[in-house]
Image: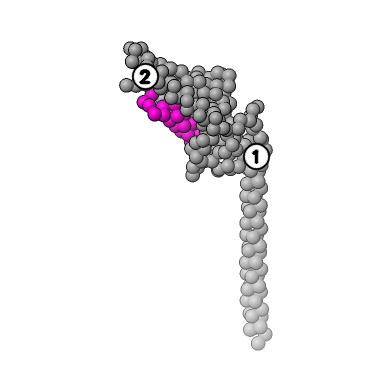
Amino acid sequence: MGKKSTEEEFYQDIDTTKKERHCCSCKVMMIVFALLFIAGAVGIWYLLKSVQSISFLPVRKITPSQKSVDSLSEKLNQSIGQSADLQAQGQVGEVTIVITEDELTSLIAQNNDDFNNNLLAIKDITALVNPNAIELYGILVKPLKSSIKISALPTIENGHLKIDIIKVETGKLETPEFIVRELNKTIENLINQQVKKGSITSLSKIELQSKQLAITGRLVQ
């Protein structure tokens, strides 16, 4: 009986030890998961704070207006007529359209859906122009909420507008490449479509000036 009792005690001790080890392992895993969760939460918090910590404000906030949209539309219609008249006289038919900051901002606001898709969403955009770049200021809503500043340099390539994004600023962190690509496509398409609206137009020159940009082009018969 004594021997049997000793064996039972031995195996009971083993079972107790296993249970204690199992309990200990579970506690360690719970602590590890808790630490990972905290680290992840801190990382997300830092990411959001880094993006939102810097606010980019334009030196002049522009309110979009229908008046500016109508003004640009009238300029485009006049340029089409002028180019056609010049070509009828045997001339090249190049004309220049001057687009002001107010007109460009209002044009973007009218086509705001172009800046909202599955990957990217920007609202409240103000467009400023200087001899070195077009600068767009706004609120990035997607993929993260932050103020945003976009510096773009337009050029003409094979009769079409080409936009090179010089810099995109959304806080302390580097802007993801896909945002830059989406902005390139969006701005190019928007200005190309508007300048060429109602006609087949070949662009030959674009000049950035103080508070406006000048685009030169002609009708292609």
Please rate how many residues cluster around mark 1, counting C-alpha atoms within 10 Å: few if below 14, some from 14 to 19, many from 20.
Answer: some
Q: Quick one: quadrant of the C terminus?
A: top left
Q: Residue 91, percent across and down?
A: 36, 12
Specify whether residue 184 is painted magenta. Answer: yes
- Estimate the x, y position of residue 202 in percent, counting from the top left: 38, 22
Mark whose residue sits in front, 2 or 1:
2
Residue at 59% across / 36% down in the picture? 124
Query: Gap in Å between the C-alphas at discs 2 and 1?
Result: 50 Å
Observer-nearest of 173 and 88:
88
Residue 57, located in which quarter of the rendered image?
top right
Residue 52: image tag: 1
Question: Under tag 2, what secondary structure?
Answer: helix
Asked if residue 155 is among those painted magenta in the image, a careful observer would answer no
Residue carrying label 2: 84
Please, what is the dominant secondary structure of the magenta stretch?
A: helix
Is 5 placed above or below 150 here? below
> Which residue type carries mark 2?
Ala
Start-end of magenta stretch = 181-203
Q: Residue at x 56, y 25 (%)?
A: 101
Which residue is rendered at x = 62% and y = 39% of the image?
146
